[in-house]
Amino acid sequence: MTGQARQETQETWVRCEPDPPGDSEERPVDIHQTRIWVRAITAAMDQNKDRLTQLDSAIGDADHGVNMQRGFTAVAAALDGYEPAGVGDVLVKTGTTLISSVGGAAGPLYGTFFRAVGKQLTGPVAEPAQLAAAFEAGLAGVQKLGAAVPGDKTMVDALAPALAAFGAAIEDGQDVGVAAERAATAAEAGAQETIALQARKGRASYLGPRSIGHQDPGATSTALVFRALAEALTS
Ligand SMILES: [Mg+2]
């Protein structure tokens, strides 16, 4: 390569280099989008009620679909007419309503997740990095309550990879909608991967090896929560 050609190549390379992380315009999440997210979860639980119940009937007590639908229907009612001061208020209200309206393990676990996330977000908007950190607080709350780790065949098997993907995308300077898409895809993959796992937590663990071959209902509903987030932040 001649000296001139090399110089041109280098100039081209410099011109094509992407903006360094953090330089791209960061789009925060506002109260309206947070409401749209929760509304999209309610719609998803309506649409997937029978599927979640089928999954739970294979390795649990067949109430997950009806529990999640009942819970998010109550959330929609609680948010109707509610005037939140911050993004977190929407999520704390969501969590509190789930705890009071859903029986079994799902109510306290999802309720704790939304409350823990919401408590971190006190402003009228949440910056992407704040949201990523708040999600981690939500996961910590779920794991503290449920004592589940990845691989136990629980909602954590969808939640942990979703949040890892979300955080990595935000750190990489991606738009919050892109981060949510990646989180949803990671949650769906994590839920799929529970099929091969033997349950070590919850009612399904009583089945021992017979729990293998069935997708975990909690991981499946968690994937719905993140697909709803992706819908809300890309619409
Ligand atoms: Mg159940």
Image (tube, rainbow, N blue to C red):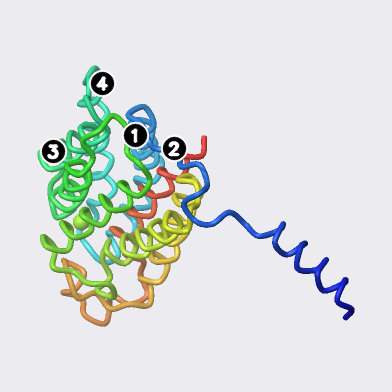
Determine the secondary structure under disc 1. helix
Q: Earlier in the sequence, mark 1 or mark 3?
A: 1
Residue in the image at 51% along x and 49% along y = 23
Q: Earlier in the sequence, mark 4 or mark 1?
A: 1
Q: Is residue 134 above or below residue 93?
A: below
* Distance between the alpha carbons at the discs numbered 1 and 3: 16 Å
* Distance between the alpha carbons at the discs numbered 1 and 2: 8 Å
Asked whether disc 4 touches disc 2, contact meaning CB atoms under 8 Å apart, the reply is no
Give how far across and how far down residue 46 sits, in percent: 36, 38
Checking the image for residue 34, the label placed there is 1
Q: Nearer the viewer, residue 53 or 101?
A: 101
Q: Which numbered disc, 4 or 2, marks the residue closer to the eye?
A: 2
Asked whether disc 1 touches disc 2, contact meaning CB atoms under 8 Å apart, the reply is yes
Determine the secondary structure under disc 2. helix
Q: Is mark 4 within 8 Å of ligand 1?
A: no
Q: Earlier in the sequence, mark 3 or mark 2?
A: 3
Q: Amino acid at mark 4?
A: Asp
* Distance between the alpha carbons at the discs numbered 4 and 2: 18 Å
Q: Amino acid at mark 2?
A: Ala
Q: Nearer the viewer, residue 179 or 51?
A: 179
Count of marks, rendered view:
4
Q: Amino acid at mark 1?
A: Thr
State the residue position of label 4.
80
State the residue position of label 2.
232
Q: Nearer the viewer, residue 23 or 225?
A: 23
Determine the secondary structure under disc 4. loop
* Distance between the alpha carbons at the discs numbered 3 and 4: 15 Å
Q: Is residue 94 left or right of residue 3?
A: left
Q: Amino acid at mark 3?
A: Thr
State the residue position of label 3.
96
Few, some or many C-alpha atoms within 10 Å of disc 1 (few <14, some 14-19, many ≥20)? many
